Image: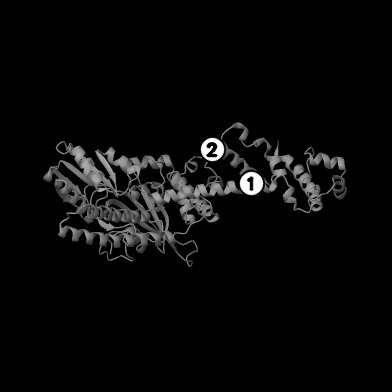
C-alpha cells in the first residue's frame, strides 16, 4: 500500500472517532458524500485547500492529516518489525504483519505511537550500552582506577587466605601480613572512593557519551578518523556525511562534526591523498618537509597525517587544544590515550608550543605509567586573526604523536596522560593527587 | 617440592604473599620488581618456573616474554603470567607470546601453587 493513501485513512479514522457522519463532513467541507467516500478510501488525492477544510471540520491540525506526517512513526514501526525479524522470535504466524502497518496505525494510533516510541527508546539504550562498553574498555581513568582496585583486592585476598588457612605462620610473618592487609584495605578504600567520585562526576546522556566532542570522536573512531567520502574527486556532501550517524545524537555534536568535515575537506583539497602518500613515502613523516613540499602550514600536515587510511602511514596520534589549553580534538594512538575528561598533563610539549606560537617543537617523551612508552612528538601552535587586525586572535596548538624509534637515550621528557592517573611521584607540575597508588 | 621460581611482580604485598606460599610449598623463590633488568634476573636465577606479572614498570610482561622466547638459552623456561586484566584479550596476548599458563588477579593461592607444580613437572 502506498504512503499517499494515508490521508484518506486518517480522515476516516478521525471522523469516526468524533462521531461525525460522512454526509455531514462532506457538507461542511463543500464536497459530495460520494467524493468524500472516495477520499476516505484513498482513491482520490486531497488538495491543499480541501485538506485545510477537512482539518478545520475535524478539529485537528492539517499536519495531522497530511501525507507523510507520520513518517517517523512508520519508520519506527518498520524498525521494530525488522528488530523482531532479526531476533528470530519464532514462528512465521507471529511475525509482524509489515504489509498492514498503515492499517495498524490508522486503527490503533495510540498503540502504534507507543510501540514506535519504545522502539526508539530501545535503539537509544542499545547505543548507550555500546558507548559505555567502549568507554569502560578504553577510558584511561577508569582503567587505572580498576587496576588499582584489582591489585589491592588481589593482595588482600591472597594475604588473608594465608592468615586464615595457616596455623603455623611465623609471628614475624604474621605481623607483616597483618600490616599488609591493613595497608591494602586503606588502598582499596581510597581506590573505591576515587572510582565512585569519578563515576558520579561523569555526566551522561542518551548515548552514554558525555559531550558533543566525545560523540564526534566516537563517530570518527569508527572509521579510523579517515573520511573516505571526502577523498574523492567529487566529495560526498557534508550534510550527507553526518546525517543519520547514530553517534551524533545531539545538535551540538552534528554542528561540531560539520565543522570538522569542512576543515577535513579543505585539508584534502590542499593535500590530495595520492600526492600526499607519495610525498610521505619519499620524505618520511617529517611534517616540516611535507609542509615545505606542498607550500602549506604545519597544522594542515599534522591533521593530514592523523587522518590517513589505516595502514597507509605510521600509527599517529593527534591532540589539539585552544588557547585555554582545553583539548578540542583527541585522536589516540597505540599506548597513547589522551584523557577524555579534564585537562591533560601540563608537561606535554603541546602546551610548550601554546606558549610559543609559530615555533616548531620536537620532543621525545616517555609517558609515565605502569608500562612507560616513548613517543616522538611534533608540537606547533598557530595564531589566526579571524576578526581582523584589531579583532581577538585565535590560537590553536597541535601535537602529533608517533612511536619513538631507536633505543632509550635518557634524555626523554617524562610526561603523563593526566595527573589523576599519573603514577609519577614528586612531579613538580602535579595539580591534583593521583588515584594510582604511587602518585603523590 | 623443590626447584627454583623467579617471581617478577611490582606490587610488593602481592609479591610477598606469592613468595610465602611458594616457599612454604618448598620452592626457592627469588623476586624482581620491575620490567627493566628482568631478562638479566632470569639469566642469573635460571629458574625452573617464571611467574610474570603483565603490567610492570619499565617493560611490559609481554615484551619480556617475547625476548625470552627469542633467546634459545631461555626459551624453554615455562612462564605463568598473572594479570589484573582478566579479559580474553590479555589472556590471548599472553598465550600468543608464549605463556604456558595465565591466571587472572585476584587469584586463589592454591591455583598458583598448583600451576607452578604442574609447570615444573613436579
Identify the residue at image location x=41%, y=47%.
Answer: A304
Instruction: Name the one closer to the observer, A206 or A45.
Output: A206
Residue that lies at the very extreme toward the bottom in this rendered image: A390
Q: Is residue A425 left or right of residue A211?
A: left
Q: In the rendered image, is residue A296 in sight?
A: no
Tag count in the figure? Answer: 2
Callout 1 and callout 2 share a chain? yes
Identify the residue at image location x=32%, y=65%.
Answer: A433
Q: Which mark is residue A87?
A: 2
Instruction: Name the one closer to the observer, A292 or A244.
Output: A244
Q: Nearer the viewer, mark 1 or mark 2?
A: 2
- On the image, the x and y values in percent for residue A255 come to 53, 54
Instruction: Name the one closer to the observer, A105 or A203.
Output: A105
Q: Which residue is mark 1?
A: A72
- On the image, the x and y values in percent for residue A326 come to 41, 61
Quadrant of the image containing the N terminus of chain A: top right
- On the image, the x and y values in percent for residue A223 come to 45, 43
Nearer-N-terminus badge (1/2): 1
Which scheme is used to colour this image of the protein? Answer: one colour
Q: Is residue A226 left or right of residue A36?
A: left
Marked residue chain, label 2: A
- On the image, the x and y values in percent for residue A17 come to 78, 48
Q: Is residue A198 above or below residue A98?
A: below
Amino acid at each position: 500500500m502506498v504512503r499517499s493513501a494515508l490521508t484518506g485513512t486518517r480522515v476516516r479514522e478521525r471522523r469516526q472517532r468524533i462521531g461525525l457522519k460522512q454526509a455531514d463532513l462532506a457538507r461542511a467541507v463543500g464536497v459530495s458524500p460520494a467524493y468524500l467516500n472516495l477520499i476516505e478510501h484513498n482513491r482520490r488525492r486531497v488538495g491543499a485547500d480541501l485538506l485545510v477544510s477537512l482539518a478545520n471540520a475535524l478539529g485537528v491540525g492539517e499536519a495531522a492529516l497530511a501525507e507523510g506526517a507520520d513518517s517517523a512513526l512508520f519508520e519506527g514501526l518498520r524498525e521494530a518489525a525488522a528488530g523482531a525479524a532479526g531476533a528470530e522470535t519464532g514462528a512465521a504466524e507471529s511475525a509482524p504483519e509489515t504489509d498492514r502497518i498503515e492499517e495498524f496505525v490508522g486503527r490503533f494510533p495510540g498503540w502504534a505511537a507507543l510501540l514506535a516510541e519504545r522502539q526508539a527508546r530501545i535503539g537509544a539504550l542499545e547505543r548507550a550500552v555500546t558507548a559505555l562498553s567502549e568507554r569502560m574498555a578504553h577510558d584511561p581513568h577508569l582503567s587505572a582506577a580498576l587496576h588499582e582496585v584489582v591489585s589491592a583486592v588481589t593482595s588482600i585476598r591472597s594475604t588473608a587466605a594465608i592468615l586464615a588457612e595457616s596455623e603455623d605462620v611465623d609471628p614475624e610473618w604474621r605481623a607483616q601480613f597483618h600490616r599488609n592487609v591493613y595497608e591494602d584495605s586503606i588502598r582499596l578504600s581510597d581506590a573505591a572512593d576515587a572510582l565512585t567520585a569519578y563515576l558520579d562526576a561523569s555526566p551522561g546522556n542518551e548515548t552514554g557519551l558525555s559531550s558533543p566532542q566525545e560523540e564526534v570522536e566516537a563517530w570518527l573512531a569508527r572509521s579510523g578518523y579517515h573520511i573516505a567520502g571526502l577523498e574523492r574527486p567529487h566529495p560526498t556532501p557534508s550534510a550527507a556525511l553526518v546525517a543519520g550517524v547514530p553517534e551524533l545524537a545531539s545538535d551540538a555534536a552534528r554542528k561540531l562534526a560539520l565543522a570538522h568535515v569542512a576543515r577535513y575537506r579543505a585539508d584534502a583539497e590542499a593535500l590530495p591523498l595520492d600526492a600526499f602518500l607519495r610525498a610521505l613515502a619519499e620524505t618520511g613523516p617529517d611534517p616540516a618537509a611535507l609542509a615545505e613540499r606542498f607550500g602549506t602550514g604545519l597544522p594542515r600536515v599534522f591533521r593530514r597525517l592523523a587522518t590517513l587510511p589505516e595502514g597507509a602511514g605510521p600509527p599517529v596520534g593527534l591532540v589539539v587544544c585552544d588557547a585555554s589549553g582545553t583539548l578540542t580534538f583527541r585522536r589516540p594512538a597505540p599506548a597513547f590515550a589522551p584523557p577524555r575528561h579534564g585537562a591533560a598533563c601540563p608537561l606535554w610539549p603541546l602546551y610548550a608550543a601554546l606558549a610559543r606560537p609559530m615555533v616548531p617543537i620536537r620532543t621525545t617523551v616517555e609517558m609515565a605509567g605502569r608500562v612507560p612508552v616513548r613517543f616522538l612528538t611534533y608540537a606547533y601552535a598557530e595564531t589566526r586573526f579571524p576578526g581582523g587586525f584589531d579583532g581577538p586572535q585565535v590560537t590553536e596548538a597541535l601535537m602529533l604523536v608517533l612511536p619513538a624509534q631507536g633505543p632509550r637515550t635518557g634524555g626523554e621528557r617524562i610526561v603523563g596522560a593526566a595527573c589523576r592517573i599519573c603514577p609519577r611521584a614528586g612531579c613538580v607540575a602535579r595539580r591534583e593527587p593521583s588515584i594510582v597508588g604511587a602518585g603523590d | 617440592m623443590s626447584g627454583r621460581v623467579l617471581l617478577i611482580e611490582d606490587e610488593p604485598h602481592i609479591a610477598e604473599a606469592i613468595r610465602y606460599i611458594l616457599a612454604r610449598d618448598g620452592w626457592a623463590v627469588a623476586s624482581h620488581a620491575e620490567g627493566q633488568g628482568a631478562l638479566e634476573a632470569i639469566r642469573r636465577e635460571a629458574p625452573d618456573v617464571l611467574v610474570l606479572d603483565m603490567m610492570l614498570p619499565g617493560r611490559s610482561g609481554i615484551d619480556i616474554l617475547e625476548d625470552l622466547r627469542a633467546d634459545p638459552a631461555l626459551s624453554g623456561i615455562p612462564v605463568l603470567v598473572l594479570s589484573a586484566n582478566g579479559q580474553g584479550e590479555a589472556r590471548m596476548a599472553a598465550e600468543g607470546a608464549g605463556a604456558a599458563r595465565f591466571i587472572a588477579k585476584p587469584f586463589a593461592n592454591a591455583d598458583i601453587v598448583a600451576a607452578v607444580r604442574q609447570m615444573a613437572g613436579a
